[in-house]
């Protein structure tokens, strides 16, 4: 299938839903036409305590959503360009939430798939990043034009969600993997 990325001023929006332990949060990812080869640069979030390599200048935003256990604040760092969307979203689980990490990871993945309507294209994978438990899933949008790589990491009460998306016209997911693999935590 052809992708809508080939026209100079074409803008394409993909709406994905994240689940924060049962709460749906819409996140819009806007994509534009390809540019020259992107220069990947490290982005440091002192507040989020992470460093990640991004192919474009990110925007940072915050928002709050309600959950069964009270408000949950979300912190999003995202960029899109050169046919790629990358974001790191982090939030702290509400006090008093007592769920096993494996249960949280399963709920997050299930919620993402149900909320976004993507079709999973590979088995979910448990990952460990610098001793931190996580889970990955890969999916394709309903229209079949876009592939997503999503990685969840749980550090104490904090959940990190890394999302990278590329056109299905891209021969592989090297850039999406490059983004997700570049993520690392920093100490205070």
Image: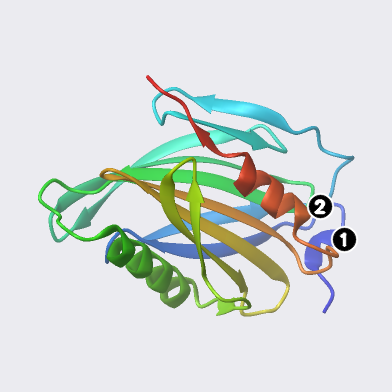
> What's the mark number on residue 6?
1
State the image coordinates of residue 131 (x, y, percent, origin top left).
43, 43
> What's the mark number on residue 23?
none
Residue at image coords 48%, 51%: 128
Q: Could one spot residue 23 in this view of the protein?
A: no
Residue at image coords 75%, 50%: 175
Mark 2 touching mark 1, by CB under 8 A? yes
Return the residue nearer the eye: 160 or 142.
Answer: 160
Q: Is disc 1 placed on a helix, strand or loop? A: helix
Q: Earlier in the sequence, mark 2 or mark 1?
A: 1
> What's the mark number on residue 33?
2
For the C terminus, the quadrant is: top left
Give the vertical position of 169 relative to 144 (above or below): above
Specify whether 94 is left or right of 130: left
Give the vertical position of 23 relative to 91 (above or below): below
Specify whether 60 is left or right of 41: left
- Residue 4 figure quarter: bottom right
State the image coordinates of residue 61 (x, y, percent, origin top left).
44, 37
Residue at image coords 87%, 61%: 6
């Amino acid at each position: 299938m052809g992708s809508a990325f080939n026209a100079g001023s074409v803008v394409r929006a993909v709406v994905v839903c994240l689940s924060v332990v049962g709460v749906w949060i819409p996140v819009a990812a806007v994509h534009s036409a390809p540019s020259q080869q992107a220069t990947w640069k490290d982005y440091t979030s002192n507040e989020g305590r992470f460093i990640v390599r991004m192919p474009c200048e990110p925007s940072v935003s915050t928002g709050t959503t309600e959950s069964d256990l009270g408000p949950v604040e979300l912190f999003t760092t995202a960029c899109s360009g050169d046919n790629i969307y990358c974001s790191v979203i982090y939030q702290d689980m509400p006090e008093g939430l007592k769920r096993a990490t494996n249960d949280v990871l399963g709920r997050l993945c299930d919620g993402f798939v149900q909320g976004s309507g993507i079709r999973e294209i590979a088995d979910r994978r448990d990952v460990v990043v610098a001793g931190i438990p996580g889970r990955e899933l890969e999916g394709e949008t309903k229209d079949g034009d876009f592939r997503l790589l999503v990685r969840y990491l749980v550090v104490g009460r904090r959940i990190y969600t890394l999302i990278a998306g590329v056109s299905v016209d891209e021969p592989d997911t090297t850039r999406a993997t490059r983004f997700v693999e570049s993520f690392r935590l920093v100490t205070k």
